Structures are given as C-alpha cells and as structure tokens.
Amino acid sequence: MIMDKRTEFCDGTALNTGAAGGYLIGNQIDMGQTVPGDPARAHNMWLVVQVDTAVDSAGDGVTVAFELRSDAAAAINADTGTLHFSSGAIAQASLTAGAQFAWQLPIEGNVYERYLGLVQRTAVEAVTAGAVSAFLTMDPPTTIKSYPDAVN
C-alpha cells in the first residue's frame, strides 16, 4: 500500500470526545481553485482508517462512523458539507488498536467541492479515548498471511 502525505487526513489523531454528533477531524485536502471533479473517476481510490489507540467510552454502546465530506471552506461543516461516503456505524468492540478499515470510494455521486475532509460521527454516547490515522490511496491495503514452509 502506498501512502502520499498530501492525501493524509490524520496521523495518530485523537478522536473528538464531545457529545454524540459529527466532528471534523485532522487536516483537509485542498483540491484546488476549481472543482477537479470526482477524484475516484480516473483511479480507484480507497479511504483507509487505521485505529492507533483503541476507542473507549463510558459504556459499551458507542458507535463511530467515518464520513468523507467536501465543502467550499476548509472548515468543513460536519452536517451540511457534501457527503461522498459514509462507513456506517462501527461498534466500539471493532475499534481496537491495530484495526484497519478500507473502503473503495464510489466512482459517481455528489460533485466534490474545493476542500475534502474526514468527519467522525459518534452515536449513542461520547468517545472518551481513541486515535486514528486516515488517508486516501490508490493501492488498498492487503492482508499478508504467512504459511509454514514444507521443509522438515
């Protein structure tokens, strides 16, 4: 998997610990003065989120979704920014340190605005701990499985 620092939203960034809701996390990608169109159209693009520190909450019911949104301003609005992708709710039990998620971005959809960012959407209750790294890549992560050799 190849990662470009210019397409990185966050690197070990703490999740927002406010009440349940949507929060812009990390950095935004400036796609230029004019709308370049859909970045996934020319190449298959993947959104990758890696959990660096396990997500925790006061109870066990918290869920977190990750949304890719764009807006005309760098301070992307977590609720009204144009939605391009949502991971759907991910249970706290799945957000353990070392967990990695990768989603291929849709080729067609809403028109992208100038700034692209990642939104953390927390439901049920507030997150009390957790950190993630997130970025776009054209090479999805692969799982390498090692097998014992057949040499005795």
Image (spheres, rainbow, N blue to C red):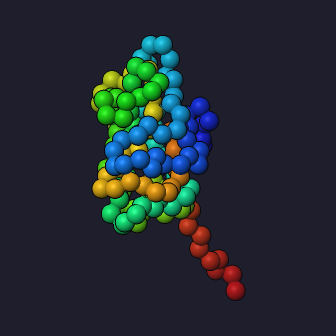
| Residue 73 locus on image (x, y percent) | 43, 21
Residue at image coords 45%, 61%: 56
Q: Is residue 22 left or right of residue 48?
A: left
| Residue 120 locus on image (x, y percent) | 41, 44
Residue 53, quarter of the rendered image? bottom right
| Residue 83 locus on image (x, y percent) | 32, 33
Q: 34 or 91: which is nearer to us?
A: 91
Name the image quarter holding the C terminus.
Answer: bottom right
Q: Is residue 34 above or below residue 89?
A: above
In this view of the protein, can residue 142 be seen by the observer? no
Q: 27 or 147: which is nearer to us?
A: 27
| Residue 100 locus on image (x, y percent) | 49, 56
Q: 38 or 122: which is nearer to us?
A: 122
Q: 104 or 23: which is nearer to us?
A: 23
Q: Is residue 14 left or right of residue 64?
A: right
Residue at image coords 39%, 24%: 71
